Structures are given as C-alpha cells and as structure tokens.
Amino acid sequence: MRKIDYKKLWLALIMVTAIVAISAASSTIASQQTDVQMPAHSLTFGVFTAQFNADGTFMLQGSGWPTMKGTWKSAGDEVEVKMSGGPKGCDGAGRYRARVNGKQVSFEFIADDCRPRQMILGQSTWSPAGEAKAIPTRRIVATAAAQPPARPEPASATGNWASFRGSQAAGVADRQNLPDRWDVKSGENILWHTPIPGLAHSSPIVWGNKIFVTSAVSSDPKATFRPGLYGDGDASKDRSPQQWTMYAIDKRSGKILWERIAYKGVPMEKRHIKSTYANSTPATDGRIVVTWFGSQGVYAYDVNGHFLWKADIGRIDLGAYDIPSYEWGPASSPIIWNNLVILQCDTQQDSFLLALDANTGKTVWKTERQELPSWGTPTVAMTSAGPELVTNASNYIRGYDPRTGKELWKLGRSSKITAPTPIFTDDLFVVASGRAPERPIFAVKAGARGDLTLPDGKSNSEAVAWSRSGRGSYMPTPLIYKGILYVLANNGLLDAYNVKTGEEVYRQRLSLVGSGYSASPIAADGKIYLSNEDGEILVIAAGEKFEHIATNSIGEMLMATPALSEGVMYVRSSASLFAIGRKPSGK
C-alpha cells in the first residue's frame, strides 16, 4: 500500500483555499467597483461645452459644429454615449474611457464610428466652464558657443534671397532671364540637381554663393507626408527620432559645402499628416544664418557653419483652434531685421512675438498676444511713418514697432486659421487668409493706429484702403507685381486685383490643379511662376489678361516656395534641390 504524504496534501489544500479566496475577493471588488461619476457642472474644451446630467442625458455644443444630444451611461471607468438626430453616421454608441481628476474630466477613445464625436471627445481634457486657464510660465534660455568665432563679412548683396520669399516676402526679382521651359529628364535648362535627405517644407534662401536649406532626417526610411486637397486634421503617426539639419550648398555647382545637425531626438511636438518636422524657412543677413526647428529650438550659425548660439523657447503646441488635441506643428519662419531675430509664436496656451539678439540669442523684447495658433511669417517694412512689423493671425492682424515690440494697431474679422505672410507695397500692407467662411483680404494703410476693425457692412475706412471677403488664400502667400495683386487658392483658382483699389482684374481656374497649390507664387521679368504639389510649375504672363505660357515638371512633390538669384530659380522638392536656368553656350 502506497504511503500518503500528508505534508504535501496539507500544502496543496492551503494553496487551493488561497486561490479560491483571492478569486472571490476579486469578484467582490469587481462587483463593487464604482462607476465613473461625471461632474454635474458644465464642461469646456476648445470651442465646445458639454453637460452630462444625472438623469443620463447629455448635450455637446460648439461654434461651427452641429449640436449633439443623447444619453450616456457608465460602467466602471468606461462611458458610453448615444445620440439621436446628430450628424450622419452617428446613430451608434461610442465608448470612451473617462478619468475624473478633481473638476476636470479626460476622455480616451475606445470605439466610436461617429467621426465628429470621436474628433471632439477622443484624447480630450475638459475643465469647468468659466474656470481660469492656468498657463505655465515659458522660459526662454539662450546658450552661446564657448568662444564665438569672428563673423565673416557679408558677401555682396547682389542676388540675395535672404528669408522666406525674399526681401519683405515680396517674391519678386527681375532681370533673371529665366527660360520658359525646362526638362529634368533630358537636362534641358537644368544646371544641377542635388538630393537632400529627410523631409522638409522649408524653402531655400540665398546669400552670395551659398544656398541654405533645412531638413528633418527621420530614422524611419518610410517617413512621409500626404499631399492633396483634403480637410483631414489628423496628426502624422511619425514619432521617429529625427536629425534636424542645416545644409549650405554652393549655388554654382550644387555641392554640399557643409551640414550641421542642430538637434537629435524624438520630436517634442506632433506634425500634421501634410506637414514635416522642418517647415520653417531659415533667414540670413550674410553673416549669420538662423533656423527655427519648433520645440527643438532656434539655432544660429555663421555662414561658414560655425555654431554661434541656440535659444530654447520651450514646447510649441500648434493645431486646431477648436479641438486643441489636434496638433499640427509650427511653420512660421524667422526674419532678421536690424540685428534682431524676430519670431511669431502663436500657440494653444500662450502667444507672443519674440525678438532675439542676432549676436547672442538673448531676448531683446517679448510681446504677449491673445491669439489662436497661427502659421504665417511676420513682415517688417520701412513705411513713410517708420518701420512696421505686421503679423497675420486669427483674432487680429496686428502692426508693431519692430524696435520695441509695442503694438501700433490691430484689425479684426480674420479667419480662424491663418497661414499667408503679410506683403507690402507703396505704403500698403496686404494680408489674406483662406479659411471659410471669412476668407478675407485686407489692404491696410501704413501709419494707422488703434483698433482698425471694420464695422458690419463696411469694406474700407480711413485706415483700410479696401477689403474683400470670401477671396483670401489658405496656404499660398499672395503676390504683388507691377500694380496687380495675385491671390492663389489651394484649389488652383487664381484671382487678380488692382492692388490700390481692390477692383477685380480677372478670375481664372488654372488648367492644371493636381494635388493642389501650397507653395507661394514668385515673379520675374513679366512672368509669374505657380508651383503645384505634384511638382508642376506653371509659367503665366503677368498683366491684366491671363495667359498660360508653359508648364514644366520636376518629377517630385513640391511644397516649398522657389528662390530666385542671378538668373537661376532654385526649387526645393520633397527630395532634392534643383537649379533651373539658361545654360551657357556650348554646354
């Protein structure tokens, strides 16, 4: 007969009893778990307000959005919402994980086929209506090289294109004698072609014999962006480590003279699916070249590639004004004026203009603004009333004294999303933006002061020469050339106006639209160059009558605005830099 091991049997009984007890306790805890209790007070997030009532009903409202009404219930930390009479496709239930932290409520998406509801609730944090928003203090820290090198003297000013779209963002350079036609495959009128690693929508700039471009080089070889005409506001899923890089290129040969990695790491912000991590165009004064890589900082080198300084301005959160959880990344570019590096930084939490000392990166002045996120580059122009710095933004278009940052004037009734850069001619600033329904164009007289906002039904005043609604451009900056204002819409609709009066000269639908137009027009020698996202550049005649001269393709996606210098057009595509010009005889 086999001997029974009572000691082992006793241990086994103890283990079984423990397992049963733990299972019973877990079941009891699960059955007693408190369902999430939604606050009784009204909640706000972006432009939205929401009310979750104790009787199981809710209502969600937002400016420009359909009202959503229905019922809600909770099970543990999950909240289920149902609607009736809401947007199309929103009849089913949506499930979200809710977390109550004091008076705030955060939602995390679980499952919901209702796209508008998912956009609003997913990854959102709601606060009590009327509660003052706590804005973290922003610290701006400048770090200079241990022993800054002596600055090289600037090269001749001839042929310079020193910042986004050249001087005052005008986009004009005559006496170029550019060819009407070129061909990348055959090499016709292609002087050289240099591949540029990474992704960037930043445009090339030129000083002397150097071209400067920037890029964000991803560790993911499949990193890309999505061109085209669409309204999706999603952020890219690309969160791969990047190398934010500045390149200097010989403008005669296309040879890369030097490259500097400003920052390495995982991006501190997200980017729109149509965007990149290097959207801002650099700027130079012939001695230094400055680039702004968003949350990664502002970096300055001399034109020979020696590091001078960097400025950490903190995390930059830009995105949808109405749904703050939709992050799109920055795009405004720096400008250099009178030894000041000027930045326009309008974010979800705080907005400001910043002037840094071009020699050290230290703050000279900083002007706070009550603004929505914006993407336009500021412009400084010398007017009959003195220098004026003009910015395009949603709450107000504003004019400042660039020496001090003091606000001089403001003009309301702009779009909720602003990207075009202000332009200037003959004591007139022209500012446009293209988000519906406003889509305005304003022509503001230099020297104005105070609040210039037009009353209802008025299109001009003593300070505003003229204005139009429903005609502004969304992405491309307008062009003023030989007395005519050209406004190019993303969808290929080109409008021409008398810049002094606002009278329409013509409206023309371009024959070739493709994925749309993001780059801004430029002009030279009586011709205008319009670049679409598919890499096709249309050449049209400037003047009161529309005339299409030629279309040329570079065979690569094209989002950046070309630069002009000494008879050559420098075109930055998604993968390369092209030099387009007439070849010398015999070549």
Image (spheres, rainbow, N blue to C red):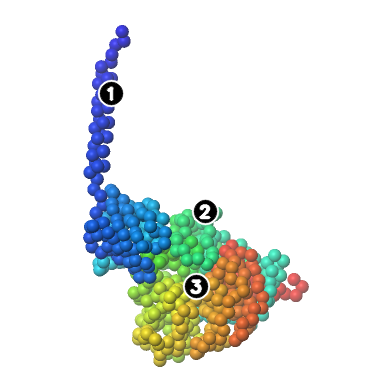
- Looking at the image, tell me whether mark 1 or mark 3 is earlier in sequence order: 1
Choose between 209 and 366: the one closer to the eye.
Answer: 366
Marks 2 and 3: CB-CB under 8 Å?
Answer: no
Is 204 placed above or below 34 here? below
Q: Residue at x 59, y 62 (%)?
A: 575
Q: Amino acid at mark 2?
A: Asp
Name of the residue lying farthest toward the front: 85
Query: Does residue 505 appear to the left or right of 128 in the view shown?
Result: right
Q: Position of residue 557 (x, y in %)?
A: 58, 65
Counting from the top left corner in percent of width and height, residue 527 is at 62, 81
User: What's the amino acid at mark 1?
Assistant: Ala
The foreground one among 119 and 542 is 119
Image marks 1 and 3: residues in contact by CB distance under 8 Å: no
Residue named by callout 1: 12
Q: Quadrant of residue 326?
A: bottom left
Circle 2 Cα neighbour tier, 10 Å, few/some/many (<14 / 14–19 / ≥20): few
Q: Mark 3 belongs to which amino acid?
A: Met
Q: Is residue 523 above or below residue 140?
A: below
Secondary structure of residue under mark 1: helix
Q: Which residue is mark 2?
A: 220
Does the rendering let one see residue 343?
no
**Is residue 182 visible to us here?**
yes
At x 37%, y 52%, the residue is: 110
Numbered circle sitting on residue 475: 3
Determine the secondary structure under disc 2: loop
Q: Residue at x 75, y 75 (%)?
A: 585
Apparent side of residue 472 relative to residue 354 in the rendered image (left or right): right
Q: Does the CB distance between marks 2 and 1 fall below 8 Å?
A: no
